[in-house]
Amino acid sequence: MDQNQLKQAVAQAAVEYCLTKIDSDSIVGIGTGSTANCFIDQIAEHKHLFNGTVASSEGSAERLRSHGIEVFDLNQVAEITIYIDGADETNPQLELIKGGGAALTREKIVTAVAKEFVCIADESKWVDSLGTFPLPVEVIPMARSHVARELVKLGGDPVWREGVVTDNGNVILDVHHLYPMASACELEEKINHITGVVTNGLFALKPADILFLATQDGIKTYYPKT
Ligand code: 5RP
């Protein structure tokens, strides 16, 4: 199977899982990216089985609406039954790097509200230690140079993703050379404490609850390794 077929396969596994968890009152959290798009396209045929969705980006919201799926503002909903999203890297603890699509802040907010976070990925995203994929950091525009200098002090090599403005009106610094990452939780906290940082793409303090990983040998299911 090529990578697109793997993404389609893992999206199908996530749809089947999701259908066991939702009812007509449920709000489904929807992530961002090509794998999440596969999920959106497949869950569309089951849209009558749940109340609606909350999306982690304007792009995903538009795709959901194009299928006739209701998209709520997060402030309109009290809870999210389940959140489905992809990742740029995952380790065996299901700590993730996310934000390749620049949606990391809204993704982290939806994760915080969701009762269950299901990560869907193909096998290219599986790593023993995080940090080969450059870590996205969302930054208030006027703080870009300050934050970059602070990230260098933490051992990283930040690169401004020029031309990209997030859905929140901010900029992205991609931090290279963090591999191997000793403690993802510690680094997540340290970066979030830099003044001017909105959030960073480490999902370690609150990792995924379950991972469906598409491999050439089929879909594998992982729970956080302790
Ligand atoms: C977007 C993300 C995506 O989940 C991540 O970039 C993976 O994308 P894809 O499924 O296209 O590989 O975090 O901000």
Image (tube, grey):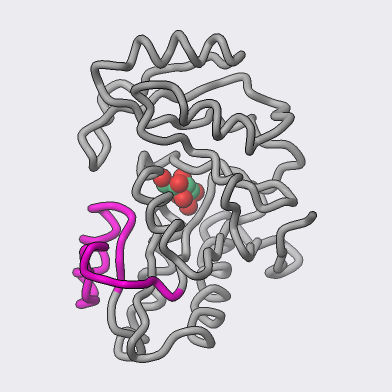
Above or below for 66 versus 153 = below
Residue closer to the observer: 187 or 42: 187
* Residue at 63% in and 62% down: 211
Q: Quadrant of residue 208?
A: bottom right
13 in relation to 201, above or below: below
Q: How many marks?
A: 0
59 or 198, which lies in front? 198
Asked if the magenta segment contains residue 80, the reply would be: yes
Task: Give how far across and how far down residue 176 sits, in percent.
Answer: 56, 21
Q: Residue at x 29, y 58 (%)?
A: 60
Magenta segment range? 53-81
Give the answer, above or below, for where 74 lies relative to 139: below
Q: Residue at x 37, y 10 (%)?
A: 146
Residue nearest the viewer, comparing 26 with 40: 26
Q: Is residue 151 above or below residue 7?
A: above
Q: Report x, y in % for residue 213.
A: 65, 61
Q: Position of residue 191 (x, y in %)?
A: 50, 27
Relative placement, left or right, of 12 versus 180 is left
Considering the image in quadrants, where does the N terminus appear? bottom right
Please name the residue shown 58% across and 15% down the image. Answer: 154
Q: Tell which residue pokes out farthest to the right in this image.
A: 226
Give coordinates of residue 37: x percent, y percent.
Answer: 38, 61
219 inside magenta stretch:
no
Figure quadrant of the C terminus:
bottom right
